[in-house]
Image (spheres, rainbow, N blue to C red):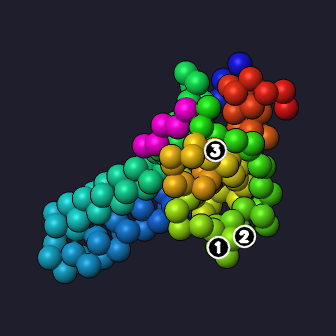
Amino acid sequence: MQPYEERLTAPRSWWVVAVLAGIAMALILLPLGPVPTLVGFAGATALAAIAVSSYGSARIRVVGGALVAGDARIPVEALGEAEVLDAEEARAWRTHKADTRAFMLLRGYVPTAVRVEVTDPDDPTPYVYLSTRSPERLAAALAAARGVRS
């Protein structure tokens, strides 16, 4: 079985924005003196960094006969064929082709994705949409976990 694990980390530019949020807070507090300015810079930067880090901590794994995506754990037996989506198709499935019942772990800064049909008749979820930087590897790992040749 091909092991697969990916963390959907936030882009570097988001970390720059976190520092800029700290600078903005420091400028707001500048009339109050140097100590409030430094405290405001440190506090706002830390809060923004925590927000960026938590949003970028989503993981996708294929482990123990299951697909683990964020908080969801789905047995591979309940999944059908994985469809690799290029940037254009992924955008279409995020927007006008999207089904509100689908489970979506999407990150707008990751252009490619995988869409996997849910074959469990008791589950109302039609498919799982996963943003991934390595869609071919994820699809191959799911096929290997199901015991299907890709």
**Tag on residue 95?**
1
From the image, tell me which residue sits under label 3.
119
Q: As drawn, is 80 to the left or to the right of 20?
A: right
Q: 10 Å neighbourhood of mark 3: few (<14), some, or many (≥20)?
A: some
Nearer to us: label 2 or label 3: 3
Q: 10 Å neighbourhood of mark 1: few (<14), some, or many (≥20)?
A: few
Q: As drawn, is 126 to the left or to the right of 56?
A: right
Q: As shown in the figure, which amino acid type bears the numbered disc 3?
A: Thr
Real-space Cα separation, disc 2 to disc 3, in angstroms: 22 Å
- Magenta span of residues: 71-76
Residue 9 percent location from the top left of the image: 55, 47
Residue 94 percent location from the top left of the image: 64, 67
Q: Quadrant of the N terminus?
A: top right
Q: Is there a contact, CB below 8 Å, between mark 1 and mark 2? A: yes
Q: As shown in the figure, which amino acid type bears the numbered disc 2?
A: Ala
Residue 74 on the magenta segment: yes
Q: Is there a contact, CB below 8 Å, between mark 1 and mark 3? A: no
Residue sitting nearer the eye, 106 or 102: 102
Figure quadrant of residue 144: top right
Q: As drawn, is 126 to the left or to the right of 147?
A: left
Q: Quadrant of the C terminus?
A: top right
From the image, tell me which residue sits under label 2.
92
First-in-chain label (2 vs 3)? 2
Residue 39 percent location from the top left of the image: 20, 60
Residue shown at 79% from the left, 27% from the top: 148
Residue shown at 46% from the left, 42% from the top: 72
First-in-chain label (1 vs 3)? 1
Residue 104 percent location from the top left of the image: 55, 56
